[in-house]
Image (cartoon, helix red, strand yellow):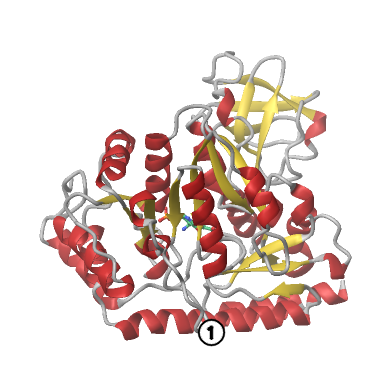
Amino acid sequence: MVSLSFVPVIHEAGGIAILVPGVCERTPPEGIGTAVVRTRHTTVRDARIPPICPKADLWFAHRTASLPDMGNPLVARMRGFGTTIFAEMSELARSTGAINLGQGFPDTDGPREMLDAAIDAINSGRNQYPPGAGFPELLDAIAEHQRRFYGLSVDPAREVLVTAGATEAIAAVILGLCEPGDEVVTFEPYYDCYAATIALAGGVRRTSMLRFPDFAVDEVSLRAAFSSRTRLVLLNTPHNPTGKVFSRAELDLICSLAREHDAWVVTDEVYEHLVFDGAAHIPVATLPDMADRTITISSGGKTFSATGWKVGWLHGPPDAVAAARTVKQFLTFVASGPFQPAVALALGLDDKIYRGLASSLQAKRDLLCEGLSTAGLAVARPAATYFVIADAAPLGASDAVDFCRQMPARCGVVGVPVSAFCDDKDAARTLVRFAFCKRDAVLNEAVVRLSALTAS
Ligand code: PMP
Ligand code: GLN
């Protein structure tokens, strides 16, 4: 029973702490969400603070039911990563009933044939471990996809690895190729798992900022990010969260720096098919002299609106794929068995299905961009992906983190502060990312709600 003087919080490991009046080191967000509560007695990390919990600086965790007092058990290199911004904002949307334009997942299903293929795979007993590298039909389908769309010649037996989403591919490559102290060059803002995975590997992140509103590559800072310790470049095109598609000239610059420093290029292309207005996605592996130093990563989740299936893959030179496979064996070994044949089928679907998915998303982009502009935000119209970045400064916002926390109350919509993807928080101080991969009815309602921002 929850009372105002004894508020239980549930630790992620299942322990229960009781908050009683006192002092706590860090103030959890008011009312909802998760927090770190550290006291003389114990540390409760990722504690779920029930909505009834009043301002936490009046409270401290007095006792836990099952956690011994062992200080902070988290390894130092992972401190500071806490709960992902996606989990925090999805929880904010859930608890407030706001429309969730934060986390990037579609609210409709992908192609019917693909869904049926997964059902068939389950019904026909394909429910045990697939082979470590992935089902042969999926390896073949990935190689054929790279040939069909990009003219690449990929050996499915030695040059492809199926992973638990692109996330595991990123982890397997970085953990497999980087020694502690090696430097990884990437762009800010970056997809959140990049920083965490580089940290897990003991690597050092070196970044170059893509600045609102055009997010062009800044050659000076990019050159400065490279050094004799550079081991790899972690690129993402089309890019989350900016919606940018890197141009040929930008890619040429990145590739020439990678060659000059003898670095690998790991290119995350999960939005490869979600490109608008005829913009051209250029896979790095197709560029001159790059195939033998490039590892390409993608995933069925974004292309086919099945983010929960976590069927990803990588391909590249056999030695690099073998290195990633060695690590991957001990991360998950395998995953997503019955979804693998379904994604294999989807990869082979007709061009018009791919075009249909992209053009429907383009119309959604237009709808949301117009709504955001009308509400008074400055919009950087994206050329690809699920996302648009808008500046809330014209509405008087001075900090997008506060702005995003207030949005459910002000207008009933949730977005994500772009600073969550940046080391240099000032460069993104008032920027908010919104996802438009939602049904038109949801977007139309969001647009109506956003208009409240102008009034408030
Ligand atoms: N890279 C980028 C740029 C992403 O936006 C995401 C989220 N889909 C991922 C990787 C992770 O992909 P997956 O869900 O397939 O692990
Ligand atoms: N890729 C999704 C996004 O950028 C989130 C995936 C996740 O929650 N880890 O919104």
Q: Is residue 349 visible?
A: yes
Q: Is residue 421 visible?
A: no
| 232 vs 202, nearest the viewer | 232
Q: Residue 226's spot in the image, x, y percent? A: 59, 43
List the single residue furthest toward the front: 260
Kindly indicate the quadrant of the structure image that contains residue 283: bottom left
Residue that mark 1 sits on: 277
Q: Please say if 318 is above or below 149.
A: above
Crowd tier of the residue under label 1, counting other residues whose Cα lies within 10 Å: few below 14, some 14–19, many 20 or above: few
The structure residue drawn at horizontal position 53% and vertical position 74%, both measured from the top left corner, is 438
| Number of numbered labels in the structure image | 1
List the single residue furthest toward the left: 124
Q: Amino acid at mark 1?
A: Asp
Q: Is residue 277 left or right of 355 when viewed as pictured?
A: right
Q: Residue 62's spot in the image, x, y percent? A: 69, 20
| 195 vs 287, nearest the viewer | 287
Q: Is residue 99 left or right of 356 when viewed as pictured?
A: right
Which image quadrant: the C terminus? bottom right
The structure residue drawn at horizontal position 80% and vertical position 24%, both measured from the top left corner, is 23
| 206 vs 421, nearest the viewer | 206
Q: Secondary structure at mark 1?
A: loop
Q: Residue 419's spot in the image, x, y percent? A: 71, 52
The structure residue drawn at horizontal position 81% and vertical position 72%, both measured from the top left corner, is 453
